[in-house]
Amino acid sequence: MTDKALKEKSASFQSRISLMFLFLAAGLEGLMAVYWIAVLEPQLTAKAAVTVRALAQSHVPAIADALTEETADSAQIIKDMENSINKILLLRDPNTGSPFILGMEIEIDYGLVNAPEGELELKRGILGPGNPFITEIPLYSKTTRELLGIARMYNNPEFFQNFKADVKVTFLAGAGVGFALLMLTWGISAVLLAKVRRAEKQLQEKQAQIVHAGRLTAMGEMATGIAHEINQPLAIIRIAADGLNTYFTRQGVAGMESKAAQKIIEQVKRAAAIIDNMRSFARADADALESVNLIEPVERALSFFKEQFRIHDILLKLSLSPDLPQVKINPQKFEQIAVNFLSNARYAVEKKGEKADKSYRKEVAVRLFQDEENGRIVFEVEDNGIGMSSEVRERCMEPFYTTKGVGEGTGLGLSIVHGIAREFQMEIEVAGAEGEGSRFRVRISHDPEC
């Protein structure tokens, strides 16, 4: 799957996840609203009405007793009834101080009461014909259990609203907690999904780098085989050129033909030297240690790059001290260090040259010398290429870490260099800044017995 397809797939999956959480959030909020309107609010209204009714019923029997008092006249009955009604109207919510009941009226069945028609009708407080919260309580005779009349109470709407508000706050708080948990879950899933996408991308990059490394290995093996096969035709060309050169010398011919034969011999020697270097670089005796002058593996590594640098107009600055002490090391492994440093330097200057103006001059400096302070041998490769940020400098030795595109690098070169440096107790220094070039340096102790 291509990187573009992977990004599209990840974006589509993230959109589906986000859409799912959006529907869940909307559904949760809608369900809570429907549950409040259809279930909780009616239940709370009914419970508030029951509360008011229960409080009023404790005072209503006094009204019925006043109506059935045989010795009292109408004035006394009304007085007793008003006292009972006033007590009911004084009932208040202890939390808000608002009255439970705003007004009250009494309807009497005068056929059962010892009083003239209409004389005992009472209306007190705010009756409010539009009040939706009305409670009616029947008045029964204590002795005969007959229905004497009805006490109609106009309840306070504010009490009902306050009663529901307390529960509503708790309900909405619970809904908010549920919504917050849902959003937290969505956030966590988004973070985890982003980590999975990054892991997938890194895995795909590592797989591409491994495949590229495999191709390079196969190409190296193939190049070694080709170098072996080329030796035979080169030997034949060399013999033929030597024969021609001997013939021209004997004949005293010093013209173009003699010079051409000599040039053939020189180029065959050069090709043979390159092939020998390739075979030496790929040789299997990687653990063999030798006491060598480091200029030898460095020059073999340079033989791979001098022509490339010339073709790509890269100025190669060499400073190789000839009289260096011997170092006990595996020459092929040190050559591998030099090859990796030179390869990275060539890539860095080429990349900068793609975007730089015409005044930019691609340069790579190779130095090999002995440090006068501590006597250690120093090998360094410095370029004026794209450079490295601080993060790249810290991670450049990690396996499979690379800033190159897929197919341009494996991320293994510098990690291999780091492994070789640890094996032979060398110190590696990486310096430079982004846009200003880089310098790779290794320090190695020489062999005092050599």
Image: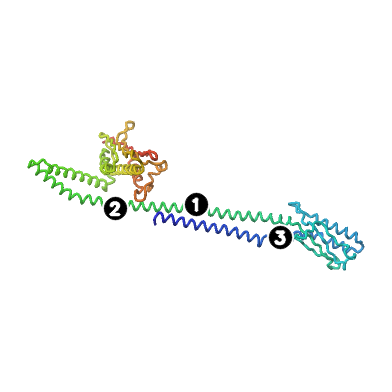
Q: CA distance from mark 1 to mark 2?
A: 40 Å
Under mark 3, the amino acid is: Thr
The residue carrying mark 1 is 191
Dividing the picture into quadrants, the one containing residue 375 is top left
Bin the neighbour count of mark 2 within 10 Å (Cα to Cα): few under 14, some 14-19, many 20 and up.
Answer: few
Image coords of residue 422 (percent x, y): 35, 42
Q: What residue is at 47 percent from the left and 57 percent from the top?
A: 13
* Label annotation for residue 45: 3
Could you say where residue 250 lies in the image, as x and y percent from the top left?
A: 7, 42
Marks 1 and 2: CB-CB under 8 Å? no
Sequence-earlier tag: 2 or 3: 3
Give the residue drawn at x 90%, y 59%.
76
In which quadrant of the rendered image does the N terminus lie?
A: bottom left
Single out the mark in the foreground, 1 or 3. 3
On the rendered image, what quadrant is the C terminus found in? top left
Task: Please tell me in which quadrant of the rendered image residue 69 appears.
Answer: bottom right
Question: Between marks 1 and 3, how big is the CA–CA gap?
Answer: 45 Å
Nearest to N terminus: mark 1 or mark 3: 3
